[in-house]
Image (tube, rainbow, N blue to C red):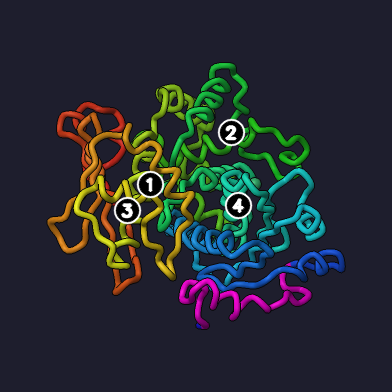
Amino acid sequence: MSRTFWGMRARDALIAAGVVLLAAGAGVAGLAERKAAANLQTYQTKYYVIHSDLDIDTVREAAARLTAMAEEYHRRTRGFSGTIRRRLPFYLFANPEDYHAAGGVPGSTGIYKRRSLMALARPGRRGGVWHTIQHEGFHQFARSVIGGKWPIWLNEGLSEYFAHGIWTGDNFVSGVIPPTRLRRVKAMIEGGTVRPFPEMLVMDQADWNAAIDRRNYDQAWSMVHFLVHGDAGKYQKAFSQFVNDVAAHRPWKLAFTRRFGTDVVAFQNTYARWWMSLEGNPTRERYVQAVVETLTSFLARCFSQRQTFDTVEAFFKAARDGQLKDHPDQWLPPKLLADVLKPTAALGRWSLDKDRPLPRVVLHAADGTVFTGAFTLRRTEVTGVKVTISLPPEAAATRPAAATRPRKQHRR
Ligand SMILES: [Zn+2]
């Protein structure tokens, strides 16, 4: 394998890969599209070939996000997906005209078309565009790596599931329920506007496209989220088998009833009951986990560059002052750090656990939950970051959320 983008310093990467122009047929076709693509530079990353005319920091961020994104798709679909054998094409445009000329739909910021993932990175709207890229990227992954003929609710629902994933530098935290979306789902259930499952399950692409409706996306996402996490993960195995059936080109209608039972209406009632039992911010813990995980990714980079801290306060002060050392090959954008520094004070008591060769970031939340962020290194390369969550004994016994996963959760 040729050297990946990660193996090089940014400047070297530009020199090595920056002059490669797109050839016709490299994913986009047609004269106008080729013209638009002609100004793009090409970068090889671990799972994607990035074509972009954006600045090097934006491309470096894209490379880091795409690597973590593909690994999260893989991790979560392990039971039924294959592996990325050929790098997937990704086009990131600076100008709307070029994006549209390449086939991007006006009004959209990202699209999956003809095997290619394309997006428009408009300044100041990075967060929004990555929600779209994670969504469209899953369509590309499903088509290229999983295969099969997918029912639309499953394809859109899983794409929305991954769209909500939070990038933490080395990983993604997925499975979050944004409170605003929870309110919309509950309002649909209460108002009786949930599309009956027997109808939703047989919707096809044409029905979906005939009336693009946010409620369809909300419902598809809520169905997938329920199948993955609902009732303490009870349906996760059956769901995995169901997607496996779909990927193996088995008739999915039969597969659905085989995996979830023939009484689809009763199943819809179970779904509705579970969603109505959720309140406020039910995945708050995952949001906090994302903060701890991000800080750990930055601490790992400092440590790999021989920058150490006596106290967590010293680490936070250096972080706020922009004094954390960059990693030459595993750079992370300062904005990622700035975003997680804001809420730290409100989350609880922080410390650094220095009783081991590699330090750990520890958060003692007010309710007694302890989040511990640990990292691994191979020489100076950060090879893994994970957060362990320990619930206080009494909470583990009484808190409903505690029943949804083991007392100690290891996440990678
Ligand atoms: Zn979609």
* First in residue order: circle 4 vs circle 3: 4
User: Of the residues shown, which amino acid type is indicated by label 1?
Assistant: Arg
Q: Position of residue 125 (x, y in %)?
A: 62, 45
* First in residue order: circle 4 vs circle 1: 4
Asked if residue 24 lies in the magenta stretch, the reply is yes
Asked whether disc 2 touches disc 4, contact meaning CB atoms under 8 Å apart, the reply is no
Q: Which residue is mark 3?
A: 296
User: Of the residues shown, which amino acid type is indicated by label 3?
Assistant: Thr
Q: Position of residue 287 (x, y in %)?
A: 39, 39
Q: Which residue is mark 1?
A: 320
User: Of the residues shown, which amino acid type is indicated by label 4?
Assistant: Ile
Furthest-right residue in this view: 31
Front position in the image: 376 or 79: 376
| Region rendered in magenta | 2-27
* First in residue order: circle 2 vs circle 4: 4
* First in residue order: circle 3 vs circle 2: 2
Asked if residue 199 lies in the magenta stretch, the reply is no
Q: Is residue 129 left or right of residue 309?
A: right
Q: Which mark is residue 218?
A: 2
User: Of the residues shown, which amino acid type is indicated by label 2?
Assistant: Asp
Q: CA distance from mark 4 to mark 3?
A: 25 Å
Of the two numbered discs 4 and 3 in the rendering, the one whose residue sits closer to the viewer: 3
Q: How many marks?
A: 4
